[in-house]
Each structure stands twice: as C-alpha cells, then as structure tokens.
Image: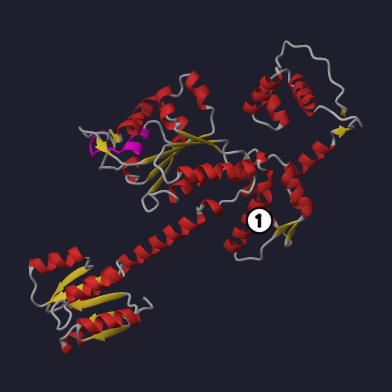
C-alpha cells in the first residue's frame, strides 16, 4: 500500500462516504473534501498518491481541479466520476490527463480495479523516473572513473559530442569500457529519456541477424509466427549501440549503410521501407582500415560510421586509474554483498599496477570480485593474488639494468629491446608482441618508427642493459 493517502472529492456526502469505505476496505488511507476548492487545498497539504474526484461540484468543478493538479504535478493520477456522463466530458477529461473516467452509480469492484491499475501505472512511472535519474547521475562524465591524462582526454571528447546527434565510433581493445562510454554519451544527450538499445553484432547468428536488427512481418519466412520489431525500431527516437560492428556480414553492412544514410529500414516482409529516428554509436576492437583493405568492411560504411572516432586506451596505458578502479569495485562489492569494505595492501596494489591487464577493465573487475569472494581477512595481501599477477613482478625483476654514469639514449634502448624480442621470436610479430606484452599494432608502429625490418644488420648499442 502507498504511504500517501488517496484524496476523494465529492459534494455528495453519501457518495463520498461509500467511496471512502470501499477504498479503506482495500487498505488505502484516505482524505476527503466536499468541493473542488477544499480538495485543492488538501492536495497541497497532504501530497496524496491519487485523486478521485466528481466532475460536478460547487466552487471548483472536477475538470478545473484536474487542470490545477496537472499544472502542479503532471504525473499525479486523477480519476474522475460523474452521474451525468457525456462523450464530450470524457474526451475533455482524457485530454486534460485524467487516468480514468467512471460513471455513477459506482460499482465497488470496478472502482477498486481502476484505482489499483492507476497506482500500478504510477509506480512504474516513478521507478522509470528514478532509474533515469540514477542513470543520469551514474553516467555523468565527471562521475566516470578516470583521472589519467588519456582518459580525461577521452571523457572531454565524449562530453563535447554527447549533445549532438553525430555518429560516433569507439575503438579499443576488448574490456576497455566502450559500452560504458556509449551509455554515458546517450545519458548526456538530448535523447537521454528515450531508449538505449545495445546490440552485440558478433553474437548475432547470421541466419537471424537481419530479423534481429530490422524486424520481420508474420509469415514472411518459415518460423516467423508473429510480427517482430527489430533493434532499430526498438531504439526509435533513442540510441542504438552496435558493439563489434565489424563482425556484420557484408549483406547486412549494405542495409546498415541505408539506415545511416536514409534513416529508414527494410523490414522483412514489408513492401515499403520504414522511417526510424535513431542515433548510431558503434564500437570495434579491430583495425577497420585493415578490414577495408581486405574488403571485409565496406569503405562507404566505414566513412559513415567514423564521423567521430574516439580511441579508448587500454588499461596498461592508464595505470594511474588502476587504484581508482580497484577502490570503486571494492566499494560496489561491499555494498552488493552487505559486508565490510576490503582493501589491498600497498604491496598488492604495486603488483596490480605492474600487471598489463590484457583483458583491461573487465579483467580487473573480475579479478577484484574473485579476491573479495575468496578473502580471509579485510586486507588483501600479495600472497592472495593469483600467480599470473605475481609473476609479472618477478619477470621484470629478472632484468638487471646497469645504467652508465654518463646517461643513455632511451630511444636506442627501446630500439634494441624491440630488435632482441623480434630476433628471439624469429621475427614473428604476433609472438614478439605477446613477449613484450603489447599489441601487434603497437609493435608494428614501433618497428616502423625505428625502421626495423628483418633484413637489417644492427650493431647493438652500449645501452647498459644486461640480462
């Protein structure tokens, strides 16, 4: 039962008492008024959860009372009653925002059903409002976790593009938080109160992908037992997030291009295209320029999607954010499990900072949950960390640096490390990148930077590195 009362307004004392009796019989608290003016005063004083009012009352009638209430609190449900029902009254009541309209003499069961339905509808509206407000706060850019220079730059760009309807392409490794950023862009846009629909394009079965994205009409193919709205229709007026967009087969890339260009979809079984108003945010962990070269991605679609490109850095390139993320995950898990907040020892945090996190923020989050679940005390020590994390520190410690007194050339050192790693792995770029705990793309960039190729002969510089 709601904590706030139901306000009953009726100038007929008998009708007023019977409505009050029926509602209190259901467990509702009530307050009553004998005219519209008194009802308006009680509305301001008692903050009711719902108003049940007669239409014809002295001083201030039900329709005028409805108008005043809606002006003060637009979501307040108001049910109107009348013994002189006309079509025009009903139409006017609904136009003014009445939740329902009842004819006298009243029926107890009908009244109870209408009141219950109005309160349930109001509860859903309140919950949706709360969720929108919560999401709006949670996804404010200043609340997203990232104080490193690279993340501040990313958040600054996101905050600038959010209010516009530009198509945005988020690039970066898996687990870097591209979907979180997409939600933040949506929540800070003019479409924030409209749907946000996320689609993992890589998980769509090829045989069903077109129907999933664009929908179908009943009977348009075997198994189409009813009409179905696709993801784009579900996101109408809002935002659609196409994660791993590069995984779409070429035939669907053509249809996606049509949506981007013409703002319309071809629904299976429909003779005419259907207009949609959707903002598109896309994400990928792949090198799209390489896919275009390999003809796995349409060049025209690539240019349409990459109006604004935002590169989300991997966690190893924003190590300053690791303590903040760890603290956030520890706090959230403490609240979720209703237990004391754990913390990491300084030594354990140092190990976390040294690790390269190939799975990025997602891997860090999962690791923190594992540590919290298995923790035997309130402080997580180095000994509690899994071997893969602890070994990172010991691997680094095996490299002995004997730095000369007269200084070194850091670029020469980096060049020599790259060269030795490539030679150690027979110039296999994938294995060399794994050996160095960097991506293949980063390795190739650095090879080009230093002009390294398999054919060159290099005298090792006096770098002072032994090992």
5 to 449, vertically: above or below: below
Which residue in the rendered view is the most extreme toward the right? Answer: 405
Residue placed most toward the observer, 73 or 363: 73
**Disc 1 target residue:** 327
Q: Residue at x 65, y 38 (%)?
A: 358
Left or right of residue 260: residue 16: left
Quadrant assignment for the N terminus: bottom left
Q: Position of residue 11 (x, y in %)?
A: 16, 85
Name the residue at 84% across, 20% down.
461
Residue 350 image position (x, y, % from top left): 76, 48
Q: Quadrant of the C terminus?
A: top right
Q: Give the x, y percent position of residue 220.
A: 24, 34
Residue 182 appears in the picture as rendered:
yes
Residue 217 lies in the magenta stretch: yes
Residue 407 picture quarter: top right
In-front residue for pair 18/36: 36
Residue drawn at the location 66% of the way across and 42% of the way down: 318
Badge 1 marks a residue whose secondary structure is: helix
Q: Is residue 237 left or right of residue 218?
A: right
Q: What stretch is highlighted in magenta?
A: 209-221
């Amino acid at each position: 039962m709601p904590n706030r009362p139901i306000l009953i307004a009726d100038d007929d004392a008998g009708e007023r008492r019977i409505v009050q009796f029926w509602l209190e019989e259901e467990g509702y608290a009530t307050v009553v008024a004998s005219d519209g003016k008194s009802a308006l005063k009680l509305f301001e004083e008692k903050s009711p959860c719902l108003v049940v009012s007669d239409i014809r009352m002295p001083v201030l009638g039900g329709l005028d009372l409805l108008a005043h209430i809606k002006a003060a609190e637009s979501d307040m449900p108001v049910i109107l009653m009348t013994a002189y029902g006309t079509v025009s009254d009903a139409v006017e009541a609904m136009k003014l925002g009445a939740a329902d309209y009842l004819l006298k003499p009243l029926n107890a069961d009908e009244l109870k059903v209408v009141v219950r339905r109005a309160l349930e509808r109001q509860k859903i509206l309140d919950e949706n409002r709360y969720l929108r407000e919560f999401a709006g706060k949670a996804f404010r850019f200043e609340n997203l976790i990232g104080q490193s220079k690279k993340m501040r730059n990313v958040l600054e760009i996101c905050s600038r593009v959010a209010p516009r309807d530009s198509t945005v392409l988020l690039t970066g490794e898996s687990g870097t938080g591209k979907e979180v950023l997409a939600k933040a862009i949506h929540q800070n846009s003019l479409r924030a109160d409209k749907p946000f629909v996320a689609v993992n394009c890589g998980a769509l079965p090829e045989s069903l992908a077109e129907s999933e994205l664009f929908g179908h009409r009943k009977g348009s193919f075997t198994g189409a037992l009813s009409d179905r709205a696709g993801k784009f229709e579900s996101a109408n007026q809002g935002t659609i997030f196409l994660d791993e967009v590069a995984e779409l087969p070429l035939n669907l890339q053509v249809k996606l291009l049509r949506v981007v260009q013409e703002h319309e979809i071809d629904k299976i079984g429909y003779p005419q295209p259907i207009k949609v108003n959707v903002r598109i945010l896309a994400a990928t962990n792949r090198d799209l320029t390489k896919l275009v070269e390999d003809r796995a991605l349409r060049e025209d679609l690539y240019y349409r999607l990459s109006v604004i490109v935002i590169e989300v850095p991997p966690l190893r390139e924003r190590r300053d954010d690791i303590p903040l993320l760890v603290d956030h995950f520890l706090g959230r898990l403490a609240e979720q499990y209703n237990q004391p907040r754990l913390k990491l020892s300084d030594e354990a945090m140092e190990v976390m900072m040294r690790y390269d996190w190939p799975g990025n923020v997602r891997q860090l989050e999962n690791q923190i949950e594992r540590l919290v679940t298995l923790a035997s005390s309130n402080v997580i020590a180095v000994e509690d960390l899994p071997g893969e994390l602890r070994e990172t520190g010991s691997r680094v410690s095996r490299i002995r640096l004997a730095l000369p007194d007269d200084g070194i050339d850091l670029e020469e050192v980096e060049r020599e490390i790259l060269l030795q790693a490539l030679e150690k792995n027979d110039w296999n770029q994938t294995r060399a990148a794994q050996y160095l705990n960097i991506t293949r793309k980063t390795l190739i960039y650095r090879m080009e930077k230093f002009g390294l190729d398999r054919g060159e002969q290099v005298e090792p510089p006096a770098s002072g590195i032994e090992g």
